Image (cartoon, rainbow, N blue to C red):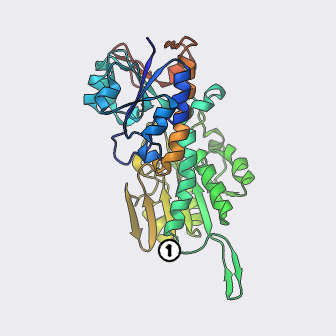
Amino acid sequence: MSLIIAIPKETADYEKRVAASPDTVKKYVGMKCTVRVESGAGLTSSISDAQYEQAGAIITKTASETFDNADIVLCVQAPDAATLKGLKRGALLIGILAPYGNPELLKNCADAGLQSFAMEMVPRITRAQAMDVLSSQSNLAGYKAVLDATEYFNRAFPMMMTAAGTVPPARAFIMGVGVAGLQAIATAKRLGAIVSATDVRAATKEQVQSLGGTFVMVEDEESKAAETSGGYAKEMSDAYKAKQATLIAETIAKQDIVITTALIPGRKAPTLVTRAMVESMKPGSVIVDLAVEQGGNCELSKPGEVVNHNGVSIIGHHNVPSRLSANASALYSKNLQNLLALIIDAEGNLAINNDDDIIKGIALTRDGAIIHPNFAK
């Protein structure tokens, strides 16, 4: 019997993405798998049931029909506890499972006898780049953050020379130079802004400059060691944070647009923009907080709201990649397909190598137990 891959319709609030595209469905069918897609699963990503059917999927009417006896469940966000209980024991759940913020999910997956893989925990090694969900989704978030800023900024981004006078260019400051930050720099630059950026990792200086931005950072011995072996930012000392905050405060006061992207895996997002910094900005300025759902980089941002404080707009949209759901779903689906190519053999059977570094990085539960070293007790 062929492996059954289930693609449910997402039920989480603010989630418009889907875990498969017609292209990846076609690939799974070519890998000798049976693919079930819940009716309507792709509509918010501009994919019709007919497109999935043409790619070889079976369209199911309900979630329970989709999940029935499925071997692999591909999702964006984790299903609820009741759904997990309904999956067959030994089934493999793969998605952006957010284990740090959802300890109950791990227990529920273990109790249901499920294998579970968290795609956001794919290790940042060369072999896994094509599976790196954080990069594919953050890239879109960085782009969209700049467009969201333009919506609330009541001036133009580029310099404009007119007979009636000159329109000065906007000044944009990007905080955090990961994938989202780099895309935000590139997008703001393309729109004509004067761009500067900061990060705790001195190694990002060249990347910022290569995109035409100016790098803003306190450079000392601590900053030289501010990156983990996995490529993520480390938490800095209080003394360093104080020096950096002084420099950032001086910089922010001169900006029109501030976009914050700083996240630390498993921790609340660091506060980078204080109330005093917001109050130093000119009326009409805009802050976009991409970390708002993990506590926020701006002291005044609120999830799902656009806060106006002394004339400064502070944007805290939910699930920014989902606001570009067609592209986000296509990229995420491809990330998943690349993972499945690693764990499904030429005969269409599940062949997971639990000693593989990629699998070690993403595997949360197996055989009724929580196995990831970050969560196992």
Residue 111 lies, with reference to residue 236, above or below; the image says above
Residue 310: where, in percent of width, then height?
A: 42, 74
What residue is shown with label 1?
284
Q: Is residue 34 left or right of residue 10?
A: right
Residue 229: where, in percent of width, then height?
A: 61, 30
Q: Residue at x 66, y 47 (%)?
A: 220
Residue 277 lies, with reference to residue 316, above or below; the image says below
Q: Residue at x 47, y 48 (%)?
A: 270
Q: Residue at x 50, y 12 (%)?
A: 349
Q: Is residue 250 visible?
A: yes
Assign the C terminus to one quadrant of the image: top left
Residue 171 lies, with reference to residue 242, above or below; the image says below
Q: Amino acid at mark 1?
A: Gly
Q: Residue furthest left?
A: 82
Residue 371: where, in percent of width, then height?
A: 41, 18
Q: Residue furthest bottom?
A: 164
Residue 61: where, in percent of width, then height?
A: 32, 33
Instruction: Say few, some or many: other residues with alpha carbon within 10 Å of mark 1 (under 14 / 14 to 19 / 20 or more).
Output: some
Helix, strand or loop status at disc 1: loop
Q: How many marks?
A: 1
Q: Is residue 216 left or right of residue 365?
A: right
Quarter location, residue 256: bottom right
